[in-house]
Image (tube, helix red, strand yellow):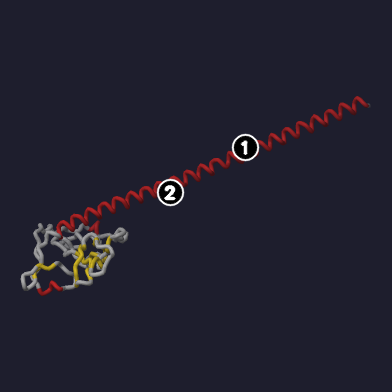
Amino acid sequence: MRVAQRLQLCLLLTISVHAAVSKKAAGYDCMATFYDGAAPNSSEEEHGKAPSTHSEAVMAEERRLEDEHRRQQRKDFVALATTMKPIYKDDNRPIEYSESHEVDQHDVVEAEAIVAEAAYTPKQQLKRQAPRRPWNPPNGVVPVYGQCGGRDYFGPQDCDFDTFCHPKDQYYSQCVPLPTPPGYVDRYGQCGGENYFGNTLCRPDTFCTYQKPFYSQCL
């Protein structure tokens, strides 16, 4: 009996050890499965971030190209606008262009520039345009209609793109727009629409904005 009991006890211990080892191995398998399942999630997160980073890079490049294009537009506009002849007062003294309508009683502004040919606006360009980013002048540059000079004035004096510093009196000078040269459409002017054959190029500080099928306006 003692031999049989010992054999039975030994068998039970062996079974217990095997069960413990199998359970521990199963635990490792579960952990391995858990980590294996977590790996794709972390990879998916990494892959999920990649398109976002790519989109930000594309948007940054688009903004850079748009700013570069607008800077070139401003240079072309200023180069053309500054070729315009000065306006003269009745005493034959030249004066600068002013937005205060002081020029209404004087001679009509002439320009030494080639008038751009009237351009037809295709229908595909009449679709509603996406809103453009507003132009904000860099630091140290005076925006349009801002003060740029005068007695006891110590602020910035550089006017923004297509404007120039016009003295109103000895105490105040203001950044006012350059005159709109031929070939360009002034602010609030028509720049497109069905059956429209006029100029379509707006001033650099405005955009040709869709209003309705027969009318687009520089705003």
Q: Residues within 10 Å of mark 2 (few under 14, many from 20)?
A: few
The answer to whether residue 59 is left or right of residue 170 is: right
Q: Position of residue 211 (x, y in %)?
A: 26, 66
**Secondary structure of residue under mark 1:** helix
Q: Position of residue 93 (x, y in %)?
A: 8, 69
Q: CA distance from mark 1 to mark 2?
A: 31 Å
Q: Position of residue 43 (x, y in %)?
A: 51, 42
Residue type at mark 2? Answer: Ser
Answer with mark 1 or mark 2, whichever residue precedes in sequence.
1
Q: Using the image as rendered, state which of residue 190 and residue 53 is in the foreground.
A: 53
Residue type at mark 1? Answer: Ala
Using the rendered image of the protein, determine whether residue 130 is visible from the camera's viewpoint. no
Q: Residues within 10 Å of mark 1 (few under 14, many from 20)?
A: few
Q: Tell me whether circle 1 and circle 2 mark residues in contact (CB < 8 Å).
A: no
- Determine which quarter of the picture holds residue 127: bottom left
Quadrant containing the C terminus is: bottom left
Q: Residue furthest bottom?
A: 105
Quadrant containing the N terminus is: top right
- Determine which quarter of the picture holds residue 128: bottom left
The residue to which callout 2 is attached is 52
